[in-house]
Image (cartoon, rainbow, N blue to C red):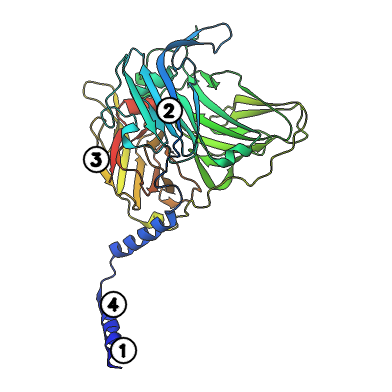
Amino acid sequence: MKKNLSIVLILVGLLGVALLLPKTDSNIASTTKDKLVTEFKGAYLEEIKPNGNVVEIDMVAAESEVEIFDGVKTRVWSYNGTVPGPELRIKLGDTLKVNFTNNLPQETTIHFHGVRVPNAMDGVPGVTQEAIKPGEKFVYKFTPKDAGTFWFHPHVRTSEQVERGLFGVLIVEDKVDEEYSQDVVWVIDDWRMTDDKQVYNEFNTPMDLMHDGRWGNVITVNGKLNETLNTRPGERIRLRMINTSNARIYIPNLKNLNAKIIAVDGMYVRDVLDLGKLELAPGNRIDVDITIPQEAGGELFKLVDNFGPEEITLAKIKVAGTVVSTPEFDLPTNKRVPLWRGAENIAIDKEYRLNARVKDGGGIEWTMNDKAYPNFDPYTFKYGKFNTMRFTNESARLHPMHLHGQFFKVVARDGKPTDEQYFRDTVLIYPNQSVDVALVPLDKGVWVNHCHILEHAEAGMVTAVTVE
Ligand SMILES: [Cu+2]
């Protein structure tokens, strides 16, 4: 009896202490943050266990020629002789090993966009590795942590090297992918060409820098002017779209087809959304699930771009042949994508103000917090914790902001809460708009955070964050 009483007294005492503790805003905020981290757990992997299978490929970057226009050779820079470069397909758990040789007349690196790689494999010169000199080799080896649609490109003089044709595709397959009738990649690129169909070889022009970067006069899908996908009625297709353009933004739409977006920037969405409203900014990927209607034999469907005032046809889907039975399975989604309700009420950890200014001695430079790379405003995100970041666009131009090595979720635009039902690695910020994003970083290292309008990045719009 005496013992019980003492326990009661201890409990009363503890309660008293708890009541006396001030309920500060920071206490409340840290409790909320912990809840948001708990909600995030399991949304994607913290670590991957390699399955022991190594997929090895030799890759050479060099000058070459491709035929985009009938009978005309266009001089390009390419990976293994084609634009786009090789489409690498591996399974989740596989290790990718790229034996890379630089036969370009310039230094280069390879960055695997959107892939959570060990920091040393991120391909950023001066941050994660030394630039690879002409004639030199480098081995990229890593086990991607996520299944999805990714791409790769240089991170040296990127606006020139990507425009000349250096980019390729990395698909990390998961088991759901196999059930589709077809699994197709459409790499959408935009080129500025001369009248004789060569890559216009002045890069980072003052006009491009002052505006939204280098928009071209030729758009290709998979390196072709008239890409057409051949299908049969009833087929169910996974279409993976990647924007590898330097600067052009698309709003892709498949007219007269019921196209559902199942993944954004490689990662499955929580709930599917309709194609036709979401921007595909440079760097972004959108995967859609479409079924060719059984009665659509002989039809031609169009992939169009609705970003600008004039609709542009990008590619076509031709339907012919005998009807096939449609594979039946649930739309692949990730119900673990958090809602993060209340995230917009949490104080912003780090704000980046995006703007431009005239450089000493003339010319434009693009800044993040008044610094132009290689000068930058350093910041550290806390590993495994809830972090927030705001992009405030103080300029009148577009900025698709890309953070390496992490996924984030948009939680507010212009201060208004929003629930995007998916993660991203690149988010488009419109003129004078602010976008708040939240993330739980699971990958340590120094990661650049930059505008994916490649001319803006080249002119300074790059910063770096540390995750530790
Ligand atoms: Cu920009």
Secondary structure under badge 4? helix
Inspect the image, locate mark 3, and give the three-letter code of the amino acid beneath it.
Answer: Pro
Label 3 sits on residue: 378
Residue depth check, mark 1 versus mark 2: number of the one nearer the observer: 1
Q: Position of residue 7 (x, y in %)?
A: 29, 85
Badge nearest the viewer, 3 or 2: 2
Q: Are marks 1 and 3 in contact (CB under 8 Å)?
A: no
Q: Is ligand 1 less than 8 Å from the beta carbon at label 1?
A: no
Q: Which residue is mark 4?
A: 19
Residue 152 shows which numbered tag?
2
Res. 239 image quadrant = top right
Farthest bottom residue? Answer: 1
Where residue 321 appears, as percent x and y from the top left, is: 76, 26
Q: Would you identify the image quadrant in which residue 379 lies?
A: top left
In the image, what residue occupies the spot 74% across and 26% down? Answer: 320
Rounded to the nearest angstrom, the CA distance separating label 1 from label 4 is 23 Å
* N-term-proximal mark, 1 vs 3: 1
Mark with earlier residue (3, 2): 2
Label 1 – label 2 distance at C-alpha: 67 Å
Distance of label 3 from label 2 (alpha carbons)? 26 Å
Q: Which mark identifies residue 4?
A: 1
Q: Label 1 is placed on what type of residue?
A: Asn
| Amino acid marked by disc 4 | Leu
The quadrant of the image that shows the N terminus is bottom left
